[in-house]
Amino acid sequence: MTTLLHLSDTHFGVERSEVVDAFLRWASANPPIDVLVLSGDLTQRARRDEFERARALVACLAPRACVAVPGNHDLPLFKPVERLLAPYGEFERAFGAARAPCLIDDALAVFGVDSTVPLRHRNGRVGRAARAALLAALAAAPAGALKVVVAHHPVDCLLDSDHANLMHGAHELVREGVAAGARLFLGGHIHHPFIRPLAARHGEPAGDAWVMQAGTAVSRRLRAGQGNSFNRLVLEPVVEGARRVALERWDYRDEGAGFVLAERHEPGWTLARA
Ligand SMILES: [Fe+2]
Ligand SMILES: [Fe+2]
């Protein structure tokens, strides 16, 4: 079994300590964590101490690999000089210089891509060079691997009021990414978790790809009607030449129950033996 934990919008600086504790309890009771994905807005104000808390969480979880991409909150909004000259300085100090990290093994290929735009705080898009690099990496990944794209800004949303928050150029990224083999798109930003087939928004070009949006994992920045949550992907061992994949959403319950399984889907992908 291979597992991928998808956390987003932790917004360290305005985290709920009781939710962080509940999450760590869940993690220690539900090993292993092979891949940890952090899909941006790790911090509230891109401060060094906030990034250090995000790093401390990664150290506690001790995944085999961590794929982290920045969100708009990980760029210094109120420090114009820093924003102009070194917008990714603190992110890179904490998570390394590669803002488009990737992880590849025979079962799972996870590609992070930076969708932030330093001079336009909230809007997201993937630049031409980054998109070309992503598409080449997707095409080159092992054919039998589940290919996953991670960006902060979403390629899908459920609410009309979130349309303005969609990544600019989302449709092209989905169409070209799916053509290059992507099966799953992970995102954050809107603090509204959901899991569904991408064809619901992008039609036939989305093929059999799915989207898995994470809520805010541990922060106080909750949207009306939404609690804290995270997602998990479980990749079963090969049986008769194929692997089963499950996509799960885990929600935090205030009544002391901690994180509980809220939804689970099996997309039914056929993944050939690598
Ligand atoms: Fe956020
Ligand atoms: Fe965001």
Image (cartoon, rainbow, N blue to C red):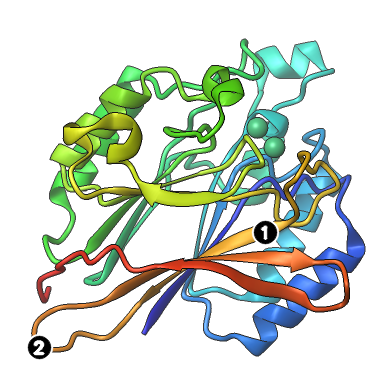
Is there CB contact under 8 Å for labels 2 and 1?
A: no
User: Within the image, what quadrant is residue 104 found in?
Assistant: bottom left
User: Within the image, what quadrant is residue 161 found in?
Assistant: top right
Q: Is residue 241 above or below residue 245?
A: below
Q: Is residue 265 above or below residue 150?
A: below
* Residue 151 percent location from the top left of the image: 47, 39
User: Within the image, what quadrant is residue 123 found in?
Assistant: top right
- Density class for disc 1 (Cα within 10 Å; few <14, some 14-19, many ≥20) is many
* Residue 1 percent location from the top left of the image: 36, 85
Locate the C terminus and report the quarter of the image it occupies: bottom left
Q: Secondary structure at mark 2?
A: loop
Q: Is residue 80 above or below residue 139?
A: above
* Residue 255 percent location from the top left of the image: 88, 73
Q: Kindly identify the amino acid type of the residue bearing the numbered disc 2.
A: Glu
Q: Is residue 114 left or right of residue 193?
A: left
Q: Secondary structure at mark 1?
A: strand
Mark linked to residue 240: 2
Q: Kindly identify the amino acid type of the residue bearing the numbered disc 1.
A: Ser
Visible residue check, residue 211: no
- Please tell me in which quarter of the rendered image ligand 2 is found: top right
- The residue at the point 82 percent across, 42 percent down is 48
Q: Which residue is mark 1?
A: 229
- The residue at the point 40 percent across, 50 percent down is 196
**Spatial CA span between label 2 and label 1:** 34 Å
- The residue at the point 76 percent across, 25 percent down is 76
- The residue at the point 56 percent across, 47 percent down is 96
Q: Nearer the viewer, residue 250 or 23?
A: 250
* Residue 189 percent location from the top left of the image: 62, 36
